[in-house]
Amino acid sequence: MKLRNPLPVIILLSACNAIAELEAPRLFEPAPRDESGAFTNPIGDLSQGTLGVRVPFMLRRFGTYFRGNEGAPLLMLPKDQPIDVADSTQATVTWVGHATVLVQMPGVTFLTDPIWSDWPSPVPFIGPRRFVPPGLAIENLPPIDFVVISHNHYDHLDLPTLKALAARDAKTQFLVPLGNESLLQDHGIKTVQAFDWGDSITINGSRIYCLPTQHWSKRGIADTNRSLWASWAVIGTSKRFYFAGDTGYFEGFKAIGEKLGPFDLAAMPIGAYEPTLMMRSTHMNPEEAVQATIDVQAKKALAIHFGTFDLSDEPLSEPPERFKAAAGKAPGVENAWVVKIGERRAF
């Protein structure tokens, strides 16, 4: 039977689909909070060592001004032409440096934790300096559909870079964990959306999930854990990508793999793990990064968050060496990539 006017049926079906999406079971619980309303981790407060550990560590950071860049990642030859937009059949990843990755998947192009600044600090020239320049110039980037931010530490949420990206393309969307949206909006970035763990959004056919991680947040004197931290998954039409952000090893990786895996590629942080008493709960060492890759069911792992800035006590060359050695002994990890800054690979 042919309907004379199918419009009401179409409207009804659309409404039913919208209701079904709203009523779909939530894959992950929202992030927990303490009695004061501050965000916390499922295991509770994290230990970051005693004052006897933290104070000497901070004093040692001043010595990094005299540290050379021996062991820092190599830089690909600078590109003087804009990078091509990935074609519809190929997914590529380019390591810009630190936790900044340019990902091109069919239908979407996005950045993770973009930082082009030389000093991730509220005060210029104070803080860890950049050893290796970014692998791409901002002006040579392809159009960026969206940016994902893991948390508000200065080496991951870099306002000068975010403002430059927003000014470059008004269509770029900025996806942040809860509590970070006002910071971007206060600096003139309007296309911001905030997410709790388990929240998701569809952009150009890809579903982006805000996911649990084990970390903390602080940007000022009195804002500890007032904004959320997160990892992100991008589930495309043909590829799946996971960005772990900045995190200690935790059981949540297994749940992410079970519910959203397997992933074609996971960007895993492998640095900033010494001194152990201070760093272990909030940063993974290379062996833990390999285990996290297995947990999330990723076929390939890209090593990030090492060598670009001098953030911790381990030698600059140690994280990638330990990462490759651990991956070589681990079943289930097809490829553990340690690439040059600016290097682009298909996945």
Image (tube, rainbow, N blue to C red):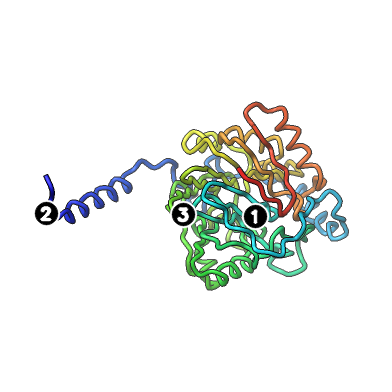
Per the image, label 2 sits on a secondary structure element best described as: loop
Q: Hey, what amino acid is under mark 1?
A: Thr
- For disc 2, the neighbor class at 10 Å (few under 14, some 14 to 19, many from 20) is few
Q: Could you tell which of marks 2 and 1 lies nearer the N-terminus?
A: 2
Q: Return the residue nearer the eye: 72 or 186.
A: 72
Q: Hey, what amino acid is under mark 3?
A: Phe
In the figure, residue 159 lies in which quadrant? bottom right
Inter-mark Cα distance, 3 to 1: 20 Å
The quadrant the N terminus occupies is top left
- Point 61% across, 58% down: residue: 84
- Point 52% across, 43% down: residue: 239
Q: Which residue is mark 3?
A: 195
Q: Which residue is mark 1?
A: 100
Inter-mark Cα distance, 2 to 1: 54 Å
Q: Which residue is mark 2?
A: 4
Q: Could you tell which of marks 3 and 1 lies nearer the N-terminus?
A: 1
Q: Could you tell which of marks 3 and 2 lies nearer the N-terminus?
A: 2
Measured as percent of width and height from the top left, residue 66 is found at 88, 59
| Residue 126: image tag | none
209 relative position to 82: left or right: left
Measured as percent of width and height from the top left, residue 193 is found at 46, 60
Q: Hey, what amino acid is under mark 2?
A: Arg
